[in-house]
Amino acid sequence: AELLHGNLREGRTAPPNTIFLSANHAKRHGRTAFVYNGVEPTEFVYRREKTNYDLFLGRLHSVKGYRWAIQGARRTGRKLVIAGGWRLSLRRGLRYVGSVAGRRKAELLAGAACLWMPALWDEPFGLTLVEAMMSGTAVLGTRRGALPEVVSVEVGTLGDTLDELVELRNSIQQIDPQACRSRAERWFSHTQMAEQYLRMY
């Protein structure tokens, strides 16, 4: 059996043993077999008392109705919290994945050929730089704020203009991932941070 998460384009039919997500989903595809999606109850918090906002949670695509939610909240005088990724229309070679954390973030950092950090303000630190280095990923950034302190020549390269960064991009391939990891462990680990705080106190 196959599970169908979305809707098929008009004129297309699902394989015979397809399982749908609801009765309506199945019916619209000329079928009857469905299983509702489920979640782990302990991953959620039950609370009787609510706060003073409404919520939109989902992809910010017109078909999801977020514009109606915004208009509805405005007309009813409600605060609205919008949570979800923006499904951008981008050219080939670009992909938007929304907010990431945990394992997904770690996988993206580890798999990247380099981290672009073209800061256009004076970055107070730049935690992403360290996260990339810890992942063995080189950094390509600007010379703003703390970047020159964090990004040494063995772990990345810095420039002042976009043209410069474009030119420097190829040199990133020569950087050793182990050098990135070693620098991050040596200077930017949680134990190093704790030791430095203790020293300050």
Image: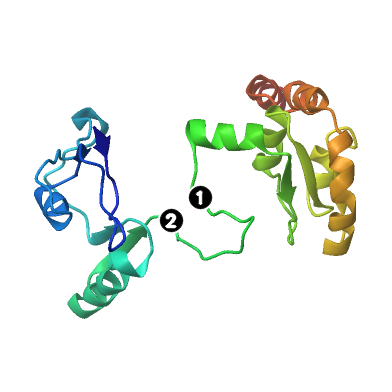
Quarter of image, res 191: top right
The disc at residue 194 is none
Q: Residues within 10 Å of mark 2 (few under 14, many from 20)?
A: some
Q: Looking at the image, how many numbered discs can be counted on the residues? A: 2
Quadrant of the snapshot with the N terminus: top left
> Which image quadrant for residue 183?
top right
Instruction: State yes or no: discs 2 and 1 in contact (Cβ < 8 Å).
Output: yes
- Find numbered disc 2 in the image and state the secondary structure of the residue it sits on: loop
Q: Nearer the viewer, residue 134 or 92?
A: 92
**Residue drawn 86% across and 33% down?**
175
Residue receiving disc 1: 97
The structure residue drawn at horizontal position 9% and vertical position 45%, both measured from the top left corner, is: 32
Mark nearer the N terminus (2 vs 1): 2
Q: Nearer the viewer, residue 154 or 143?
A: 154
Q: Is residue 172 above or below residue 59?
A: above
Seen in the picture, residue 74 relative to 59 is either above or below; the reply is below
Q: Residue at x 65, y 40 (%)?
A: 127
Q: How is the image coloured?
A: rainbow
**Tag 2: amino acid:** Gly
Location of the C terminus (image quadrant)? top right
Mark 2 lies on residue: 85
How far across and down, in percent of the image, does residue 13 sit? 25, 52
Tell me where residue 69 appears, x and y as whole percent: 26, 69
Direction from residue 133 to residue 54 in the image, left or right: left
Crowding at dot 1, Cα within 10 Å, few <14 / some 14-19 / many 20+, comes out as few
Quadrant location of residue 137?
top right
Q: Choose between 132 and 2: the one closer to the eye.
A: 2
Q: Is any part of residue 154 visible from this angle?
A: yes
Q: Tell me residue 88's x, y (percent).
A: 50, 63
Q: Left of 85 or right of it: where is 5?
A: left
Residue type at the position of mark 1: Val
x and y percentages locating residue 71 in the rendered image? 27, 77
